[in-house]
Image (cartoon, grey):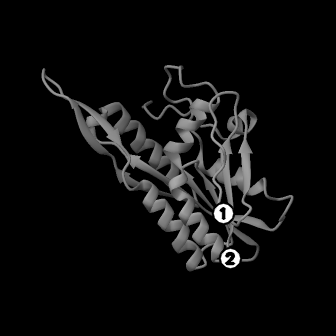
Amino acid sequence: MSGTRVVVFIDYQNVYHRARGSFGYESNPDPNLGHVSPFKVGDLLCSLGYPKDRNRIVTGVRVYCGKPDHRSGTSLVRFTSRQMAAWESTAGVTVKARPLVYHEVQKGGRKSKWRAQEKGVDVMLALDISIGARTDVYDVAVVFSADTDLTPALEDAANFGKRIETSTWRGPFSNRGPLKVTGHSLWNHYLDQAHFDLVRDDTDYLAA
C-alpha cells in the first residue's frame, strides 16, 4: 500500500474516563457521556498529522478494553456487547478485549457486590505496539492513552525506527500530560472539547 501507514491504538477505558474528567462529565449521572467512535478518532488523528505528512493513511484502528460479565449488571453487559459489535462492523477497526477481573467487596444479604478491574489490557496493547514495529505493520503508531505503563513499548518501537505519536485530552478540568520517551521527541495531539464533539458517540446501545 502506498503512503505512510498509520495505525491508531486506543486505550478505550483510559480515553473514556479521561474525557469525562477533562470536560466536566464526571458529576453527570449519564454514563454514556465520554464515549467516542474509534473510527472517527482514527480518522481525526491521522488528519491532524497532514501538515507534516500529507501521504498519511489510516491502515488500522485498534481498540483495547475490558469486557464485563453479569457481575457488572446486565445493562452494562448488553451495552458493551452492542457497542463492541458496532465497532467491529466498521471497516478497519479491530477490537481486542479481555474479561474484567472481579473482586468481591461486600458479602451478605441477597446479593454480593463486586468491583471490576481491567487486567492485562495494557500488556496486550504494549505487545501490539512493539510487535507491530518489529513486523513492520505500521510506519506511524498513534497511541491514544495517558497510561505510563505503555512507555517501554513506545520506547521500543521508537528505537526500532518507527514514528510514535501520542494523543491526550485537554479540557478545563482534570488533565494529564502526554506520554514521554527519554531520548525521543514525541508529537502529542492535544484534543480539546471541539475535537471531542467531532468524535463523540451518543448512541444509546441499550435501545431496542
Front residue of 182 and 30: 182
Counting residues from the start of the chain, the first of labels 1 and 2 encountered is: 2
Residue 97 pos. (x, y %): 41, 54
Q: Which residue is rendered at x = 58% and y = 25% of the image?
A: 25
Q: Which residue is rendered at x = 57% and y = 31% of the image?
A: 20
Q: Which SS class for mark 1?
A: loop
Identity of the residue furthest to the bottom in this view: 135
Please say if 85 is above or below 53.
above
> Which amino acid, by three-letter code, is at mark 2?
Gly
> Which amino acid, by three-letter code, is at mark 1?
Thr
Q: Quadrant of residue 61?
A: bottom right
Residue 49 pos. (x, y %): 79, 58
Q: Which SS class for mark 2?
A: loop
Residue 45 pos. (x, y %): 71, 53
According to the picture, the residue beneath numbered tag 1 turns out to be 182
Q: Can residue 182 be seen here?
A: yes
Number of the front mark, 1 or 2: 1
Q: Can residue 89 be seen here?
A: no
Q: Which mark is residue 161?
A: 2
Density class for disc 2 (Cα within 10 Å; few <14, some 14-19, many ≥20) is few
Q: Quadrant of residue 143?
A: bottom right
Please say if 206 is above or below 82.
above
Please say if 41 is above or below 130.
above
Front residue of 146 and 180: 180
